[in-house]
Image (tube, rainbow, N blue to C red):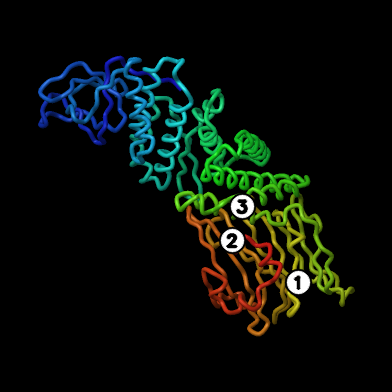
Amino acid sequence: MIFALAATLAIVVQDHAALRAAPRSSATELARLWQGDVLEVRGELAGYLKVYDHRRERGGYLRDDAARPVEVAESAAPELLAVLRFLRASPGSEALGISYGAAYLKAAPPRAITAEPFDAIAQMAERLADQASGSTNHLADFAPHLEVAEQFGVHMRNFERSGRMRVCYDGELFNRVLTIPGAQAEQRAHAVLGLTRPDCIDPEMGPVQRAAVDAERAQLLEQVKDGELNALMRSRLHARRAEVWAALAFSLERRGEPAGAAAERARAELLAVHPVDLGDDRRAEYVDAVLRVSAIRWAGASPAAQTGPLTLSAAPGSPGQTCIALQDARRPRAGVIIRRCTYGLVRMASIQAIAQVPALVLAVQPLEGWRELWLFHEGAGGWTVDVLSPGLDEPEEGYVEFAGYAPATRRLLIAREVKDRGRFRRSFEELRLDDLALVRQASGPELLRDFGRWQDVAWRRDSLALR
């Protein structure tokens, strides 16, 4: 990261500030300036600063109330640091704060520089990236601020996820914080959280490279000791570890390696989170971890013996596929009743027979944070396999699970939770078994009568949907 600042300069403090050809409001506008733009000051006339913009290679006049002259000298370093501390906690002033951070690093003697300014600039860069993420039009609104940050070596990366642009800070200064002796625990925690964000992993990354990235994220998160953090940061760290270990469990199982320990670590980290400590602003981090840990709920678990007449078995299909076959022990000569194949991870430990009707359910995980429910059941036309998905749109994150069966009404009880376009939705539903039509839906199981009487005991004990 390179900070190139002139000795006599001013920092623009207003957006849409007009750079004019002469020191009057009626003069031709040469350019629009933005918070954080750095200008060389060459004089003052009639309430205007005569400036030169090296980034745009253009000189002109700017109203003196639109910029603040800044002295880049050791004597000014304490004042610059005070301004940096103020702007760090002022959402909407990220580009301005980054400029003041650059000025401080230029003015302060090397012996006096701690991890604080790097932590502050990195946090503001991350916040700016979050604000810029969204639709193309939303990104255009923040493009000038991103360009301001770029001139100081604060680089961003762009990814497209589910039709939306995701802007991410590249994390260079977070890495620097981790190398500075004496960095405070919470500064180190900010750094590792910034470097391990799941939404800033390239979605085009292949499985081998992704597994390496997840292993590196797990190592980074181990660098911070929980006991040195406040309650908020401690819960954020546990939630991030839960997400990372869930990703590791998925990649291990996909490679055919034991995943039980990773899955157990993910669950333990999730249970260590205190959601109340996160508040509303950070609650999404917890819910995200819940969805990802729920998706690997049966990872590494050993299947129980199937005692009923209806059984499911798994066998290799085409390269990369697993095929599930349904058989009836009462009709051994009939062979396979129905067969379906998938490229996802089949959770054989999740097999559950619905005792009151000829039906079985099975969890299948095709993607890292996405778990479906397969329903094998017999209807008027014979046996079918229906796939219940967490959501109808493009997969982002989510799970759906069997929660019970109401025999009197022939209703299947399920729980769904999904992340769709950045928003989380959780629902409890009663579906008609014959055609899986939605009969009732509620935000909580207590609002549905059949859930109160017929919910599955094992589901109630183990599910994260009731957190």
Against 113, residue 285 (above or below) is below
User: What amino acid type is highlighted by mark number 3?
Assistant: Arg
Residue at position x 74%, y 54% in the image: 321
Which residue is the site of mark 1? Answer: 353
**Mark 2: secondary structure:** loop
Quarter of the picture holding the C terminus: bottom right
**Mark 1: secondary structure:** strand
Residue at position x 78%, y 46% in the image: 258
Which residue is the site of mark 3? Answer: 292
**Mark 3: secondary structure:** helix
Residue at position x 56%, y 24% in the image: 179
Q: Which of marks 3 and 2 is nearer the N terminus?
A: 3
User: What amino acid type is highlighted by mark number 2?
Assistant: Arg
Of 457 and 146, nearer the camera is 457
Of 269 and 454, nearer the camera is 269
Would residue 399 appear left or right of 282 to someone viewing this image? right
Which residue is the site of mark 2? Answer: 467
Would residue 112 appear left or right of 337 to someone viewing this image? left
Q: Distance between the residues labelled 1 and 3?
A: 25 Å
User: What amino acid type is highlighted by mark number 1?
Assistant: Ala
Q: Distance between the residues labelled 3 and 2?
A: 14 Å
